[in-house]
Image (tube, rainbow, N blue to C red):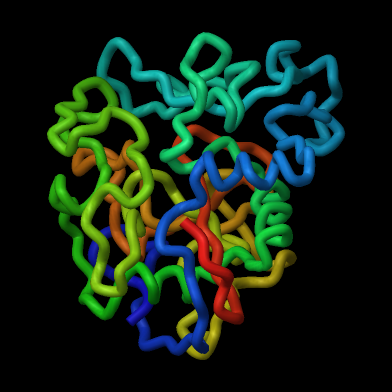
Amino acid sequence: MMGSALVYAEEGPPRMTRVDDFWIDPHEVSNAQFAEFVAATAYVTTAEMPVDPAEYGVPRDQIPAAMLEPGSAVFVAPDRASTRFTDWWRYIPGANWRRPEGPGGPEADPRKPVVHMSFADMQAYAAWRGGRLPTEAEWEFAASAGEPASAGQPSGDSANSWQGAFPVVNETSDGFYGTAPVGCFAPNLFGLYDMVGNVWEVTSDFYRSGHDPLARSNPTGPSESDAYDPLNPGIVTRVMKGGSYLCAPNYCQRYRAAARQGRDPGLGASNVGFRLVYDQAPSKRD
């Protein structure tokens, strides 16, 4: 049963959906795994390169100089309660997968999920690894593992989410303030880790609010020309799933298999990652 009518309108309508067989990574792509790819190919991620304003159709002189430097979007907790996402998201020059918090922060933990990836970065890794980004239907099938949709926050031993009043009070009762190492929480019934919480996971589908009720066999989302994201007008976004460590009951109840939002394909963030699926059994990996 794909979709839900329990929380957000853009997650419906729920309907019985079928997907063909596929293989899927047991956890999100880690920093260690992405480092192997970079070592083998000398790949440079989008966040490590200067911003090209032409990609956004904006004159260079209308963009602050700091936002043209290589960098990415980083969550920084505000000093007071707020409902404006601009109060806790900052574009930090020098933030990338190697230093997720920026130049003054620690180096990436090899065990944690790789973040600050553009869609092009994810595709490049997928091609090297012999996999692909999952469709939304494939991802949701794997995440739900046959269990019915729920509106509740997952327990602290099953997923990494925000405990407390977001964005100012994180009680860290699950043991982590930020991202957690991949695979350190209990798996779902399919043996898959972190399908909800920890970091959002990007899929191959273009985003449009709500599901097509007639698309029930291997759906792949709307065409690029029919995609529309009201939260990102003017940008064709991709569907991301499962919420992240920033999801809390008082603000973002997206720590669920049916949860979905659009993601700017050209901009990374400190709470967005990915995992791969395969049409044939992949070679053994960690």
Residue ID at (30%, 10%): 79
Location of residue 88 with respect to 120 vertically, above or below? above
Instruction: Please state the total of marks drawn on the protein image.
Output: 0
Which residue is rendered at x = 37% and y = 56% of the image? 242
Left or right of 138 on screen, residue 153: left
**Looking at the picture, how far across and down is residue 90, in whole percent?**
52, 20
The quarter holding residue 77 reads top left
Quarter holding residue 186: bottom left
In this rendering, position of residue 39 left or right of residue 182: right
Side of 108 where 133 appears, left or right: right
From what the image shows, is residue 140 above or below residue 87? Answer: below
Q: Residue at x 60, y 66 (%)?
A: 205
| Quadrant assignment for the N terminus | bottom left
Percent position of residue 148, x then y: 21, 76
Pick the residue in front: 145 or 77: 145
User: Looking at the image, which is closer to me, 57 or 148?
Assistant: 148
State whether residue 73 is above or below residue 127. Answer: above
Relative image position of residue 144 (x, y in whole percent):
30, 71
